Image (cartoon, rainbow, N blue to C red):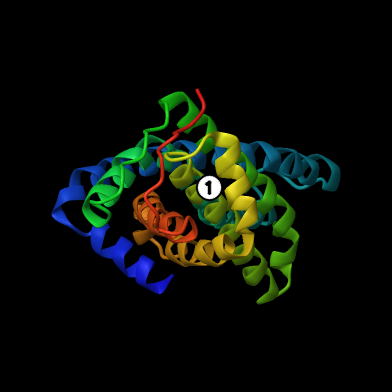
Amino acid sequence: MLDAAIKALSHILSPEVRSVLLKSIGLAIALLVVLVIALNRLLLWLAEPGRDFVEHTVGLTPHGPVITILVWLLTVALGFGLVTGAIFLMPAVTSVVASFFCDEIAEQVEREQYPADPVGVALPLTRAIIEGVKAALLALCVYLVAVPSLFFAGFGAVIFFIATAYVLGRTYFELAAMRFHPVAEAKALRRANNMAIFIAGMFIAAFVSIPIVNLATPLFGMAFMVHVHKSLSGGRRQEVLGPMR
């Protein structure tokens, strides 16, 4: 696993993938901005009834000092909520971004690192996007379940890390495996190697937890899982079946 992670890091830092890296980062930033704006609107919408309740029920004046303090506290809370939301959204965002660039980065790794093996079949863009969106929705569902644990110091961070490792390990392995197997077979291969893939997912979860650097998660995750898939499939020269259309 460590050797695969080192190879993946060296690959994404190579000049050959610079253009893919820049496109991936650009798309990730664009999606994150859109989602944070949407989250901001949602938080403001949820906060409005609370302010109205204080003004009309408690009887405070709109421009009084107490209301001013409450508005300031609300602004701080919203800012904290946006930052926290951005952290939670990053794994989901990178899952969607990966669907656009998974085959480009996987093919480069396969050709350079495994020249004697056949190159995988690229996923149809529609299938790749569907898998990316499904992974993003799964990530959001898992994180919503894990959010209550964040109120317990230390324990919450561990739960969030485990959830991220599970989702990202599953996502990137399936994208790598679908280049060589029909969809159902790729998912069965993932289920048969759940523990190994979860451990691999911990490397990606560690990567995505690093601010700024995590914008390159789609490239690292995909390059890393190409090596993991090769290892779990025995490193043999296999017939390329590709995804079922």
Residue 29 falls in image quadrant: top left
207 versus 221 height, above or below: below
**Image location (x, y in percent) of residue 90:** 49, 51
**Image location (x, y in percent) of residue 204:** 46, 61
For the residue pair 244 and 19, the one nearer the viewer reads as 244
User: What is the crowding at mark 1: few (fewer than 14 residues within 10 Å), some, or many (at least 20)?
Assistant: many
For the residue pair 230 and 29, the one nearer the viewer reads as 230
Which residue is most to the right? Answer: 57
Residue drawn at x 44%, y 61% as measured from the top left: 231
Q: Is residue 25 visible?
A: no
- Is 36 left, or right, of 187 in this rendering? left
**Image location (x, y in percent) of residue 82:** 54, 51
Label 1, on which residue? Answer: 171
Secondary structure at numbered mark 1: helix
Residue drawn at x 44%, y 46% as measured from the top left: 176
**Image location (x, y in percent) of residue 34:** 46, 36
Residue drawn at x 70%, y 58% as measured from the top left: 147
For the residue pair 22 and 124, the one nearer the viewer reads as 124
Q: Is residue 224 visible?
A: yes
236 versus 98 height, above or below: below
For the residue pair 28 and 114, the one nearer the viewer reads as 114
Q: Amino acid at mark 1?
A: Thr
- Is 183 left, or right, of 240 in this rendering? right
Quadrant of the drawing holding the N terminus: bottom left
- Is 145 left, or right, of 179 in this rendering? right
Which residue is most to the left? Answer: 15
**How many numbered badges does the structure rendering display?**
1
Residue 195 falls in image quadrant: bottom right
Residue drawn at x 52%, y 61% as measured from the top left: 201
